[in-house]
Amino acid sequence: MKRGQILGILALLLVCAVTVIPAMAANVTVTTPKIQDAATNYYNAAAQLTANGNFTEAIALYDLALASNTTMIKESDGLLYTYQGKSFAQIQLGNYTGALATLNDGLAIYPNDENLLNNKGYAQYNLGNYADALNSYNEALSGDANFTSAQINKGDVLEKLGNYQDAVTAYKAALASDPGNTVATTKLAGAEKAAASALPYTLIVLAVVVVVIAAGVAYYVTKKTPADKKAPASPDKKTGKKKK
């Protein structure tokens, strides 16, 4: 074989080698270690179900997350979001007692979380525990005075308690933190109307109270104060006898 032919064959083999090797390399899959965490996986799946409105299935996965090792999701606030998400799903299903239990568990770990406190107030409100709900909303607002949802919810419970003027104040605070909020705007109008209607009734009640107090005072003065007694007759200076 001639030298030129040999060089040509070598060149052809080199071209084939250069072409085939990169193609083979492109088919190689490089795997990297992936950290698997059961609680995180359950939480992520539950959050997706919650977003899609599948609340019952979401709650089951939130429970699995809480039953797993929660060390990793606690470091990333995933544990907090698990309690928030589970309580939200329970509230959507009308399970206010279950939601309250979940929220109390969450608040034992995150006592100052405004969202947990707001959700707790909402559950208490729907269970008829209005005074407790008001306390929860106030706690939430102590951490974030501009928490619009908590302000609106506070206004709702104040209206339920008949404190219409305070409800007006709460709705106005909600609008101050979120101007143009349609829910706060509508509820403010209703609370202002209720407060205006309640004013004459309040005045009547006050008038009745004043009359009752006045009558009581008059009775006390008339019946309880002893009548004036005549002064005893002084003895006659000449006879030493009392004058008749």
Image (cartoon, grey):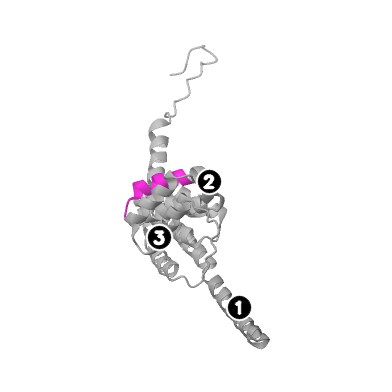
Q: Determine if the magenta segment contains residue 16.
A: no
- Residue 18: which disc? 1
Q: Mark 2 Cα within 10 Å, few/some/many (few <14, many 20+)?
A: few
Q: Secondary structure at mark 1?
A: helix
- Residue 199: which disc? 3
Q: Mark 1 Cα within 10 Å, few/some/many (few <14, many 20+)?
A: few
Query: Considering depth in this image, is 42 or 163 the residue closer to the camera?
Result: 42
Contact between marks 1 and 2 (CB within 8 A): the answer is: no
Q: Mark 3 Cα within 10 Å, few/some/many (few <14, many 20+)?
A: few
Question: Which marked residue is nearer to the observer: mark 2 or mark 3?
Answer: 2
Q: Secondary structure at mark 3?
A: helix
Q: Earlier in the sequence, mark 1 or mark 2?
A: 1
The residue stretch that appears in magenta: 93-106
Contact between marks 3 and 1 (CB within 8 A): the answer is: no
Reply above or below: 20 against 161.
below
Q: Give how far apart the Cα atoms at labels 1 and 2 are.
A: 50 Å
